[in-house]
């Protein structure tokens, strides 16, 4: 049967290479028969990130229009507490329904929340409350939805396939992160904060048929290879085991190291985000005047400014994803790719220790986030290619949500102590990040070693570690 995006097998001869396949080979190593499913995943990742970037700037506009920049860090505490409940419910749902229904139910729940926010606005809930509520909610959404997508992608590919194809799939997310802020910056003044939420809801719903198509195509391919009986469910059509995500992380040194790295990196990233937010808020109040605090003009000004900053980071991420990620994987492997972002962050925050302007922090954070969205995100997702199905979904979701927000919680404590007790400047917070990056590099060394051990175990006939 012909794969329209790839190659058409022909009896008695080699597969005929299609034009799409030829283009894809310019950016990654891809084999005949692989493009169709990989392109569907790429489109899926594009829609997830494009939809997210319609509402990402809104969180900053709603919050900073009525609250100081420090509150962003403090709100990590309720977010982390919320994730304890969310991850337990996610693991329980994953044990009841197959993967495509799991993704569908979680996504539709998020859509219902966005509709609810509009209702709360219509009944007159003040912006000071809405900013806090929405900021806490989007902190759940922007981690859980990508985590379940990458768990899905990890469940589809082997380690060898994922190493080749993940850079291409992540390109869709990088492209969505570029186009999303551009689109948001144009329509935020017209639709406003709550209109953007409804637009994002439609995009989330539009991504669900892709998930079903990918799931059924993957199951058909595995059935064909295994010559399975049509009436016998394939393992990928079944719910997962009942083991919880936190228990899986605690039982594995490899997963625990990844969790610690993600928590520490998010602490560093969030502290940098606080530094940039404080500078941006100060500039906005200086331009518009302090009397506009909480007003629509200030909301839209900050939202538009953040959309431009996020657009810059996304463009950088797209370039890295398109031209560098697959090559870095081939040159230094997945373990070696872990070191690029901490070294970039070390140089940026090391310089910021001696003076940080709004323009410098904008470019530093744009390069940091761009590398995170592209190389780092692809790398940390690829770390789960050598894990069990339960670890791919449940442990990855726990790490990408609770442990990430745990890093934000530490940021909240540091911001409070640094601003209230020590009265630190932006340069002082940059120095804290430099020390933290040194620890991050040590964790990268340990994870790289554990990755090689696990990979050796799976390629020499050993089994992926299981947990009770």
Image (tube, grey):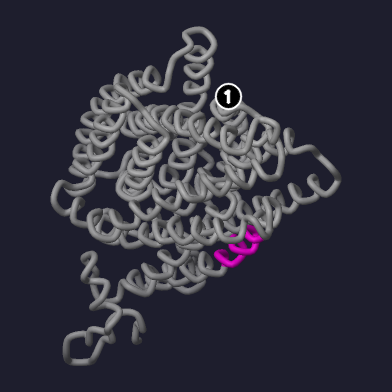
Residue at 86% across / 46% down in the picture? 123
* SS at badge 1: helix
User: Up-down: is 439 above or below 362?
Assistant: above
Q: Main secondary structure of the magenta part?
A: helix
User: What range of the chain is rendered magenta?
Assistant: 199-208
Residue at 64% across / 34% down in the picture? 289
At which x and y percent is residue 230?
48, 74
Q: Report if residue 206 lies within the magenta region.
A: yes
Q: Is residue 408 left or right of residue 156?
A: right
Q: Nearer the viewer, residue 7 or 435?
A: 435
Q: Quadrant for residue 383, please give it.
A: top left
Q: Nearer the viewer, residue 121 or 289?
A: 289
At which x and y percent is residue 144?
53, 45
At which x and y percent is residue 284?
56, 37
Residue at 34% across / 52% down in the picture? 317
User: Up-down: is 369 above or below 9?
Assistant: above
Return the residue found at the far right.
123
What count of labels does the image hold?
1
Please say whether residue 94 is visible from this viewpoint.
no
- Quadrant showing the N terminus: bottom left
Residue that mark 1 sits on: 74
Residue at 49% across / 59% down in the picture? 182
At which x and y percent is residue 435?
30, 19
Q: Residues within 10 Å of mark 1 (few under 14, many from 20)?
A: some
């Amino acid at each position: 049967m012909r794969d329209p995006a790839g190659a058409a097998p022909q009896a008695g001869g080699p597969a005929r290479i299609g034009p799409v396949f030829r283009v894809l080979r310019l950016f990654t190593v891809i084999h005949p028969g692989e493009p169709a499913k990989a392109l569907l995943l790429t489109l899926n990742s594009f829609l997830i990130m494009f939809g997210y970037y319609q509402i990402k700037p809104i969180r900053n506009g709603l919050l900073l229009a009525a609250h100081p920049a420090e509150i962003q860090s403090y709100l990590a505490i309720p977010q982390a507490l919320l994730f304890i409940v969310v991850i337990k419910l996610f693991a329980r749902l994953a044990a009841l329904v197959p993967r495509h229904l799991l993704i569908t139910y979680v996504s539709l729940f998020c859509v219902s929340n966005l509709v609810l926010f509009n209702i709360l606005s219509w009944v007159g809930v003040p912006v000071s409350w809405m900013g806090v509520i929405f900021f806490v909610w989007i902190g759940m959404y922007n981690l859980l939805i990508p985590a379940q997508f990458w768990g899905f992608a990890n469940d589809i590919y082997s380690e060898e396939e994922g190493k080749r194809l993940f850079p291409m799939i992540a390109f869709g997310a990088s492209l969505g992160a570029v186009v999303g802020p551009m689109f948001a910056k144009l329509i935020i003044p017209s639709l406003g904060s709550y209109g953007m939420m409804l637009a994002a809801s439609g995009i989330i719903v539009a991504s669900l048929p892709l998930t079903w198509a990918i799931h059924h195509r993957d199951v058909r391919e595995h059935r064909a290879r295994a010559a399975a009986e049509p009436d016998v469910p394939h393992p990928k059509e079944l719910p997962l085991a009942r083991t919880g995500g936190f228990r899986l992380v605690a039982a594995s040194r490899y997963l625990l190291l990844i969790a610690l790295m993600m928590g520490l990196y998010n602490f560093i990233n969030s502290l940098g985000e606080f530094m940039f937010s404080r500078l941006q808020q100060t500039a906005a109040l200086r331009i518009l005047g302090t009397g506009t605090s909480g007003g629509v003009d200030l909301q839209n000004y900050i939202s538009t400014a953040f959309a431009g900053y996020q657009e810059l980071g996304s463009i950088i991420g797209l370039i890295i994803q398109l031209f560098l990620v697959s090559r870095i994987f081939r040159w230094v492997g997945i373990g070696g790719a872990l070191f690029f972002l901490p070294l970039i962050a070390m140089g940026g925050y090391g310089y910021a220790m001696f003076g940080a302007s709004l323009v410098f922090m904008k470019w530093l954070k744009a390069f940091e986030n761009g590398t995170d969205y592209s190389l780092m995100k692809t790398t940390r997702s690829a770390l789960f290619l050598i894990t069990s199905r339960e670890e791919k979904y449940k442990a990855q979701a726990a790490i990408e949500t609770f442990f990430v927000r745990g890093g934000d919680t530490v940021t909240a404590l540091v911001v409070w102590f640094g601003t209230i007790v020590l009265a630190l400047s932006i340069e002082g917070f940059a120095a804290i990040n430099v020390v933290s990056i040194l620890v991050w590099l040590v964790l990268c060394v340990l994870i790289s070693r554990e990755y090689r051990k696990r990979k050796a175990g799976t390629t020499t006939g050993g089994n992926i570690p299981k947990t009770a």
